[in-house]
Image (cartoon, rainbow, N blue to C red):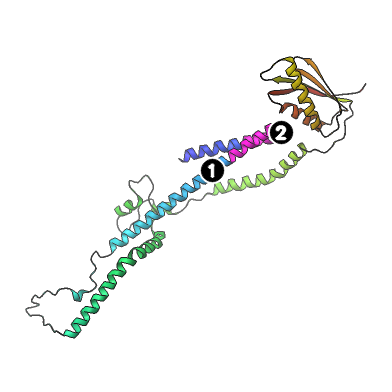
Amino acid sequence: MRAVRLVGYTFGGLSAVYAGYYTVVYLTRWEWQRALISAALLIVVEVFLATVLVLTRLARLEGRIEASDARVEEVRRRLEQSRSPIPNRFNWLSSVDRTPLDGTQRTFVFVPVLMVAGAALSGIALVIQKIAGATARPGAERRLAGRLAALTAPTLGEGVAGSGTAGNRRSAPGTTAPGTLGDAVPRARTGRRLLAVTAGVVGLLLVPLLWTALADATQTRAEEAPHAASTTLVFRVDTYGDHSAAAVQLAAQDLWETCRRSTAAQNADTSLSALRDGVYTGVVRPALPSHDVMRLRGCLEDANTNRTSAVVLGEGQADSR
């Protein structure tokens, strides 16, 4: 069970790291559709890990409750065994053996009034004692067993035949079962704590760096225009289902008109021309800054047009002549 849980944690952790990494990568490339898919996958993996962790904790808590109840019941049974099976608290009401004692006979003094009063009071006390014992003993013994359960020795490991209680019963009085003291002392987890502290410190140091890098990559502020006349992108468009030239031309035109408006810089003067089957050249005048070129390339490769995909083959800045 522990190996299966470890495999699940490892698989979930690697999947979360993989999805989170590509979420950041797609955000920096301005490929929003792919970033949304990666983020959704990251959320699913996180929910999976949280569910596994909660179920593991609940199973562990249930095991502890069952072990505690078993120890309480064992203590209660031992209390029942230590009690006399037939208590005789009123010995003077028992029948008298009228046998000779040292050759003499017992002498009985009959005092009718005292005998009747004593018998009546003893009978009433006996009834009260029986009622009190029948009603208060189970609850009192259970509460006492619950208090004494914390003082009992822990159970033996699973390798010992039977439960820890049976192992304690087979032990000699006044001795301790082997392995009990070692189980009672928890093991130090210095390595795990050191690893957790190290991971926390590294995470705190990486958060500002990652935050700054992501903010710079996804910024939308206008940048200074480069010293070039135009920006040129060459990309290939593929369609699924309908591969006719008219369908590809329409998909390329729709994709280009959508993506050219994704830049922060003004690009009213644009043109799109076909080079060969499925390959097109888009020109933007004036030239776009490097960050806008990255946004335009990411929008083209993250084509959200139905049944259309595009791949940027090259890009560059054209100087005026």
85 lies left or right of 51 = left
Q: Position of residue 204 (x, y in %)?
A: 67, 46
| In-front residue for pair 103/121 | 121
- Up/down of 14 relative to 173, above or below: above
In which quarter of the view is residue 136 placed? bottom left
- At label 1, which amino acid type do we have? Thr
Verify whether residue 8 appears in magenta. no
Instruction: Tell me the quarter of the picture where residue 241 sits.
Output: top right
In the picture as drawn, the residue positioned furthest to the right comes out as 321
Q: Name the residue under label 1.
A: 51
Q: How packed is label 1: few (under 14 Cα within 10 Å), some, or many (20 or more)?
A: few
* Visible residue check, residue 199: yes
Name the residue at 46% across, 47% down.
Answer: 59
Q: Which amino acid does label 2 sit on?
A: Trp
Task: Give the residue furthest to the left.
Answer: 103
Q: How crowded is mark 2: few (under 14 residues within 10 Å), some or many (20 or more)?
A: some
- Secondary-structure class at tag 2: helix
Q: Indicate the quadrant containing the N terminus: top left, top right, bottom left or bottom right.
A: top left
Magenta residues span 18-46
Q: Where is residue 91 in the image (x, y as percent from the top left)?
A: 20, 74
Task: Provide the residue designation for mark 2.
Answer: 32
**Residue situated in front as seen by the camera: 212 or 174:** 212
